Image (cartoon, rainbow, N blue to C red):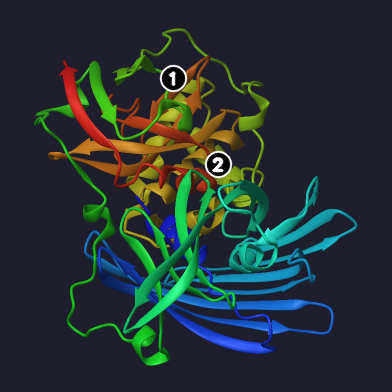
Amino acid sequence: MNKIIPIILSFLLFTCQKGKKMTEEETWLGFYLNNKKVGYSYQKFQVGANHFRFYNRAKMRLAMAGKVQELLTTTDCLTNQDFTIQNLRFELVSQNQKVRINAFVKDEELYQEVFTERGPHRTKTHLEEKIYPSFAIAKIINQKGLKKDKDYTFHIFEPLLNKILPATVTVLGGETVRVGDSDYFCIKAKVIMANNISYYWITKDGATVKEETPPQMLAIKESPQEALSQEKGEETIDIISYFSINADTVIPNPKGLEYFKVNLSGIEAKDFDLNVSDQKVVSENPLILEIRFPKLEEKTIPLPLNQPKEFLKPSLYIQSDDKEIINKAKEIKGEKNDAKEVAKRLLFWVYENLRKVPTASLPSAVDVLKMGQGDCNEHSILFAALCRAVGIPAKICVGLVYSQGKFYYHAWNLIYLNRWVACDPTFGEFPANPTHIILKEGEIEEQAKVLGAVGKIKIKVLEFN
């Protein structure tokens, strides 16, 4: 699964804001995963006549299935003096993709432009509350006089997810922390956003010197030379293996299973989408799931299906209304009109025609169709777009799947054939075998929420046949 994007999100939440008296100050952060250097960020905070400017450039280097991937993100944001957003520019560049996002606020409306291979996609969202950039969190904690042990909610615009997310901020008290060779007396604060908990250590001048997000993700203040250094020859962390979960039981033939029963520990059912399709929660304490292999209706299901409408509409990255997507879907569909047969054709076309390449990207269906390669995110987003283009409701789900003695984080699909049915275009499974454990439904924003389970969740296989 493409895990780099949500990790980038976590590191982007690491901020390092400056003292009140400075008109401009620069700071460098080193990013670490399991105590190994994986990247850095350069940050600048400027004070204008009636605004603040937050600038951030971050680079990360990780491996996916043995292939080294690099991502560079740049964010440039102007805020009002209360740190609410005036305008923002964001850019993500990887080996395979470049995405640019522009946004500005006017008259309680958020205007956005997202530029991908398809060209610009424009949206307007009415704002019910003030919105802030993630980089302003430390400033807010430092300057707004937040009381100890009291929860405060601020709404953060996250361009990477194209979402406004509530962030709960709690000041925990004072604490001395050592960073490098220096000791700093800091305000320690907890921030909860998208199911993820981060801890900030902020000096009295408003500088963040350390931030931590489980599991084992760390950002610390460094000199430019330290931040830019990454030891040559040092093994790059392979995040697919690193975040995998060892299975306590060998499952000889997962594709042949009809039934799968597991005990999940380390998470709470209320934080995830666990009662989905053929997956049911049979106990919450302990948390036990039963997953059955889907049974398809024998009768013909004529196209197009008109419900549920939400999952027939195009979205920012599932561009089912794009001319090339529509033409390709019709070409694969041919003269068939049974939704089951057409969905199967679409799935196996994606499985057979996309090269299985670990890919660090912000996947969009149009880009994937053009590139012809990707990992599970690219497969599932293109399959969803092709399905919607011919009138089959489709959505993406993220979770865990068993393979060769481990459970791996993965993305696949649910399609509506008079009921929701799980299928996996990456593995060519129609329907998907029952070792697919759904944690969340949705697009990239749900991957960030699944980070709340990473490093915490444990799986005990109870029964399979």
Residue 396 position within the rendered picture, expressed as x and y whole percent measured from the top left: 48, 37
> As rendered, which of 109 and 147 lies closer to the eye?
147
225 sits left or right of 340 in the view: left
Residue 121 appears in the rendering:
no
- Amino acid type, callout 1: Ser
Q: Name the residue rendered at 54%, 76% in the picture.
A: 207
Residue at the image position 54 percent from the left and 22 percent from the top = 337
Q: In which quarter of the image is residue 177?
A: bottom left
Q: Which residue lies furthest to the right in this view?
A: 107
Q: Where is residue 343 in the image (x, y as percent from the top left)?
A: 46, 29
Q: Nearer the viewer, mark 2 or mark 1?
A: 1
Q: How far apart are marks 2 and 1 (CA)?
A: 20 Å
Q: Nearer the viewer, residue 431 or 14?
A: 14
Residue 313, quarter of the rendered image:
top right
Q: How many marks?
A: 2
In the depicted structure, whether residue 230 falls above or below residue 293: below
Q: In this view, does 179 lie to the left or right of 52?
A: left
Q: x, y percentage for residue 237?
A: 24, 65
Q: In which quarter of the image is the C terminus?
A: top left
Please state the horizontal and vertical placement of residue 27, each as a whole percent of the image. 51, 84
Residue 277's label in the rendered image is: 1
Residue type at mark 2 is Ala
Mark 2 or 1, nearer chain start: 1
Q: Camera-side residue: 52 or 261? A: 52
Q: Which residue is drawn at 60% across and 46% down?
A: 150
Q: Is residue 220 above or below residue 47?
A: above
Which residue is tagged 2? 385
